[in-house]
Every structure is written in structure tokens, then in C-alpha cells.
Image: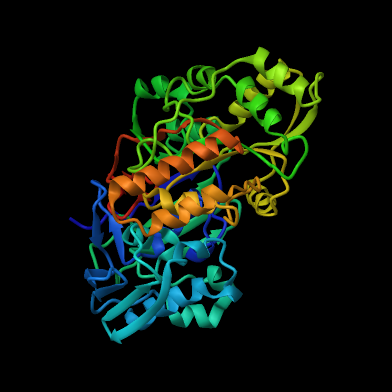
Amino acid sequence: MAQNIKPLRYATGTDAQTLDPQFVTDIPTARVVTQIHETLIYPNSAGEMVGVLAESWDVSEDKLSWTFHLRKGIKFHDGTPFNAAAVKFTFDRIMAKETAAPRASSAAAIDSVEVKDEHTVIIKTKSPYAPLLAQLSAYNLAIISPSAGVKLNNEYSRAPAGTGPFKLGKWTPGEKLTIIRNDEYWGKKAASAAVEFTVVPEDSARVLMLMSGEADVVSNVPPIMVNRLKGAPGVKIVEQTGYRTIYVGLNLDTKPFDDLKVRQAIAHAIDTKLLLSGVMNNIGTAGGGLESTVIPGSAKIAPYPYNPELSKKLLAEAGYPNGFTIDFYITTGRYINDKQLGEAIQAQLAKVGIKVNLQSPEFGAYSAMLRQKKIPMFLLGKGSPTGDPDFTLTINVHSEGTGNYGNYRNDKVDRLLTEQRSTVEVAKRNEQLRQVLQQSYDDVPWIVLFYENQIFGERENVRGVEVLPNENVLFVNAKVE
């Protein structure tokens, strides 16, 4: 049977922000980039690391040198051969200060990358680094063509050249991005000739597109629509547990959130149980720690109890007996029911005297504002590309983390994050991670709302879309019959 020639039409809430792996900071972007690029290794459905561009690997006795044996005969989309020099170029590029990659920390443990021969590369770490294999599976460390990297430099996103099963077709930012099958792919060829990513911010609009047949797959189905879609002809629901935490962030460098009592007041004024049942239709899991409890090495921490009277008392003690007014930035279409969550939190905070002005800029602009670390209060989600807490805790919790948008600082947390990286004893490392999660919970730089389940909708004639716990979506085997 000939391969299916119909394009797969995927409706997503937000557009890709870049096609350069080293500058990706959000999952919708990663879902495009990972179709075009590949990492040395990647977790399978059971969470075990398997070879992708690397066939095998071994580590020295002192745990400081990792030798990767690479696949042969692979070419990047621009025709450049994939080899050890390409791996070294990629890692050297993200580690270089002049690159200014927002996720440079993903390679921070690497001391050097050496080319042993054309198909053997040695990665040396500064000290034993427990989560190295998980780290190497991160989309930020996907391998790029050295030729394209040198030629395009900071404009690499215009013509990305990876080794993946798809390559860039056409991109109209804010509207549609098309990837097309890479017929020279080294592995199993993509089942569809193309995948079209159409940007549709409104949840209800994406659902209508699915029901009418205008879209084959849609992301972030609103929980209130799940039961309706389950009974609708021609469509099906795909629900998968995930690693994402949805939370409200507070900027500790902005008044009044520099006061712990105010932050505690916010925490007790938000009824997370009601948000989960009322807004999310109980699709998700309650929790208080920043890392989802599905992730190995995480810790179970109870949510802050809803107590508006205690919230008012704490506000009065902090000098705000009549509350205050604050801008609260939220996304629209990025997370499931994000707009509705923002509106519900606005209503809950009003009950303790806090007037919230909702702001919802376009996601690209919102992301840029977050990176400036000046937004006072924001709704955001935090995933885990690697399935190991180190990656995202370093980015979000460390005082110098690029995703620490609320300027949270705690010396104990920084020290524990450094120590856990070289702790190879699993139980000891998990205790260090637990302390990081507990301490940051106590300091209230954010309020966890819940751990999000992934909900996708598909037409009944769609086959082969694979949704992973780390929120990546694989389209290589996807097709419309």
C-alpha cells in the first residue's frame, strides 16, 4: 500500500516561537522542533533511555567521561553528514555565552566534548552527574547541522536543518506552519506527506474544527467538552497523564509580593480544589509541590488549604487590610481552560479584597515579557522535557534560573540543587530534591493549582499519533485513513 498522501491537520493553541532547538522554552514550540530535529537518546514509552542518533554508550569508572557511538550514514536536511563533529558543534554552540541560549543550563554539567573519531564522541562532565542521560534527551540538546548553524547563526530558525523525519515546509507566523516528510530519513519514513500546524487560540474554536472535520487532531480540549466529544460521531478523545504543573507565579521583586505574608495570603485565598472540580471538571491531579508527582524523584506535598479568613488576617498584618490592586497576566489557548482559570482566580481573590486586572497578551509577547522578569503576577505551566526534576528545577527554582520569572532566591535551595546533581545514590538524591520542593513551597514564590492531564481530540480516521508523558507529540507514524 502506498504511503498516505493526505496532510495531517493539527490545530494548536499557540504558534511555535522558534525552530532553533537551543532557544525553545515552551512545549508547543518543542512539538514542532522535535519533528525536525533529534537528540542522541530519548526515553521510550516506559521512560527508559534508548538510542536515537547514538547507537550505544558507556561511562568511565569515575563517571566523568561518557562515550557515545553514533549511527552511520545519516545526513541533515541540508545534506551535511551527521557525525561526531556535528555533536561537538551543537553542544559547543549552546554552551557559548555569545549564543545567549535561554536553556544553556541544560548543558551546564558538560565540561567538554571531544571527537574521538568520525562516529565516536566523548562527553566529559565536571563532576559525576546523575541526570546526564535524561538531560541529553532534552529538546534543547537536539543536534543541528554545523553548516546551517554557521551559515545562518542567529537566523537558523529560518531554515532549520536537523535529521528528523520531517523538514520545514512553509511557515506563516501566527497562522500556520507546515512540515513535510523527509524522504531521505534514516529511520522509518513518516506515514503522512505533511503535517499542518494551524494556530487557533480559542479552545471552543478548535473543538468546532474537529467536529466539522476541518482539523484531524486538536490540542487542549476543554474538560467541559470531553463528555460531549466522547459521544459525538466521528471523533475520539485521547487523555494522557503528563508532567505539567499549572501555577500562579508571584514576582518577589515587586511589591507587595516581597512580603511573605502577602504571598501566603494569596495562597490561602485561591481555592485550588474548586478550580480543579469546577473549571477543570476534575481532569488533573491536586498537589502543592512544583514538580508533578508523576515524575520520578518528585515529592507529594499537600496544596495550601483554602482559608479566606486567614488570608484577610495575613493581609492586614502585612499592612493591606483593604487589599490591593494588581495586574494578573494569563495565557489564552496555551493551557487547558487557561482563560477560565484566570477569571476564576480573579473572582476568588476579590473575596479577600484583592482587585485583579486580567492581562492576556499574545503568547509570543507574553513569553518575552516573562523573560524580562518584571511581571508582578502570572499564570503559567511548567513541564518536564526530560522526566527528571533537575532540568526544570534548575531553570525555574535556582536563583539564576532563566525560567525563574518571579526572582525567587534561597541559598539553601541553590546549594541543594548543586549537590543533587552529583549524588548517584537514588534515595539520597530524592531526599535532596524533596527538600528543594518543600523549601520552595514554604517560601511561596508560586501557588500550584494542579498537575495537568493532556487532552487531545482526534477524528476517528486518524491513526498513529503518539502523546508522551513529557507532552511531546510524535507524528512520524500518524496518518489520516
In this view, the residue farthest toward the left is 1
Q: Is residue 214 above or below residue 40?
A: above
Q: Residue at x 47, y 51 (%)?
A: 416
Q: Is residue 47 left or right of residue 406?
A: left
Residue 329 position, x and y percent, is 69, 38
Residue 407 position, x and y percent, is 66, 48
Whether residue 202 is visible here, answered yes or no, is no
Q: Is residue 193 above or below residue 66?
A: above
Protein image colouring? rainbow
Relative depth, front residue between 462 and 81? 81
Residue 217 position, x and y percent, is 40, 41
Q: Is residue 423 left or right of residue 172?
A: left
Q: Is residue 31 left or right of residue 151?
A: left
Whether residue 289 is visible here, answered yes or no, is yes
Question: Residue 166 occupies which quadrant of the picture?
Answer: bottom left
User: How many numbered marks appear?
Assistant: 0
Residue 148 position, x and y percent, is 48, 79
In this view, the residue farthest toward the bottom is 117
Q: Is residue 401 above or below residue 185?
A: above
- Quadrant for the N terminus in the image: bottom left
- Quadrant for the C terminus in the image: top left
Q: Residue at x 50, y 78 (%)?
A: 149
Q: Residue at x 71, y 15 (%)?
A: 351
